[in-house]
Image: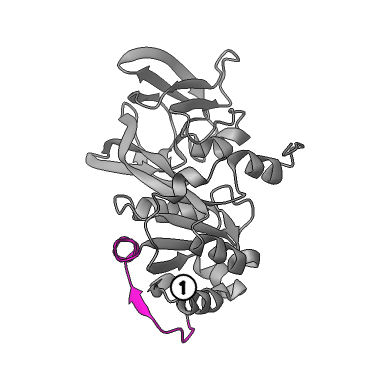
């Protein structure tokens, strides 16, 4: 990947916001070190309430993630992929880049780790990074008579919940009937989400800049039902035809609405994007080789 193309367009970083998973932050003690490194570089540090805990770290504190993002040139997100997903949703529309620092397990969406924070910040200050603008998707509909809208960076999931019975889902793509799935659930995944739940359910890995969505039925009754790739610009409508138990819609693993029979869900591309920082040496394929233990060569 040629990083030099993106370097000239990067906005100078004068202020950095820190946000993350409180449990992982307390265990690692990373915040105090990050604050020191950022301050020593001559940049301002803003803090989310989540990174303070019981410590005596001083700084400008923001109780709201969106306000923190709007005040910062860059957000450092400390945690795992789940934390990055949450912050991406909460700061949607701010246009502020996010640098994920992995303090969790897999870390597909992170470009640094708590073990190499010093080196990662030096790379950042040297402008050796690019910004990947990743589009979000939104799901909207009615739940028990009330309207809702859910944003997701990875995926929208319609599931049967704890019930052992299959659900029936009628799906259309751009108002053209596709099929009726009888399954445990349906994943609508972005390219970023192709390495998450969809991958575990047999879906393909999709490169981040591919303009596509994956429709992936979970354990379908019909063996001919396979993951389907559609254009990212498509509007997908899902109607819950039949289910005798509780059904749910979740966005990036967070339950957003309980669904009833005949509820209609519309999924489409959001106007918002998450801007993830990718440091030099952290290409998508390098991440796949490292995280999934694939063999490969840089040659």
Q: The C terminus is located in which quarter?
A: top right
Instruction: State the residue in front, 87 or 273.
Output: 273
Residue 146 appears left or right of 108: left
Q: Is residue 58 magenta?
A: yes
Q: Position of residue 85 (x, y in %)?
A: 46, 50
Is residue 78 visible in the rendered structure shown here? no
Q: The N terminus is located in which quarter?
A: top right
Q: Is residue 33 above or below residue 172?
A: below
Mark 1, residue position: 51
**Which residue is rendered at x = 41% and y = 84% of the image?**
58
| Local secondary structure at mark 1 | helix
Residue 43 appears left or right of 2: left
Q: Which residues are magenta?
A: 54-72
Instruction: State the residue in front, 208 or 61.
Output: 208
Q: Is residue 7 above or below residue 212?
A: below
**Which residue is rendered at x = 48% and y = 61% of the image?**
77
């Amino acid at each position: 990947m040629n990083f030099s193309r993106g370097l000239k367009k990067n906005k100078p970083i004068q202020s950095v916001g820190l946000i993350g998973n409180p449990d992982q932050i307390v265990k690692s003690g990373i915040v105090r070190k990050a604050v020191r490194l950022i301050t020593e570089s001559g940049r301002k540090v803003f803090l989310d309430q989540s990174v303070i805990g019981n410590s005596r770290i001083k700084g400008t504190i923001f109780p709201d993630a969106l306000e923190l993002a709007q005040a910062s040139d860059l957000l450092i997100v400390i945690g795992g992929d789940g934390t990055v997903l949450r912050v991406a949703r909460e700061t949607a529309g701010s246009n502020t880049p996010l640098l994920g620092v992995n303090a969790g397990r897999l870390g597909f969406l992170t470009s640094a780790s708590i073990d190499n924070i010093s080196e990662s910040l030096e790379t950042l200050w040297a402008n050796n990074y690019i910004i990947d603008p990743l589009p979000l998707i939104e799901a909207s509909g009615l739940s028990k008579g009330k309207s809702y809208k859910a944003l997701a960076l990875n995926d929208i999931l319609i599931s049967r919940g704890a019930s052992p019975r299959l659900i029936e889902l009628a799906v259309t793509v751009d108002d053209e009937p596709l099929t009726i799935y009888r399954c445990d659930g349906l994943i609508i995944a972005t390219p970023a989400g192709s390495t998450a739940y969809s991958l575990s359910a047999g879906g393909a890995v999709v490169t981040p800049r591919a303009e596509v969505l994956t429709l992936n039925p979970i354990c379908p009754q019909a063996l001919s039902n396979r993951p389907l790739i559609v254009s990212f610009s498509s509007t997908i409508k899902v109607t819950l035809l039949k289910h005798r138990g509780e059904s749910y819609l979740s966005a990036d693993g967070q339950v957003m609405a309980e669904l009833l029979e005949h509820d209609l869900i519309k999924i489409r591309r959001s106007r918002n994007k998450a801007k993830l920082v990718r440091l030099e040496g952290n290409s998508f394929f390098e991440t796949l080789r490292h995280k999934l233990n694939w063999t490969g060569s840089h040659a």
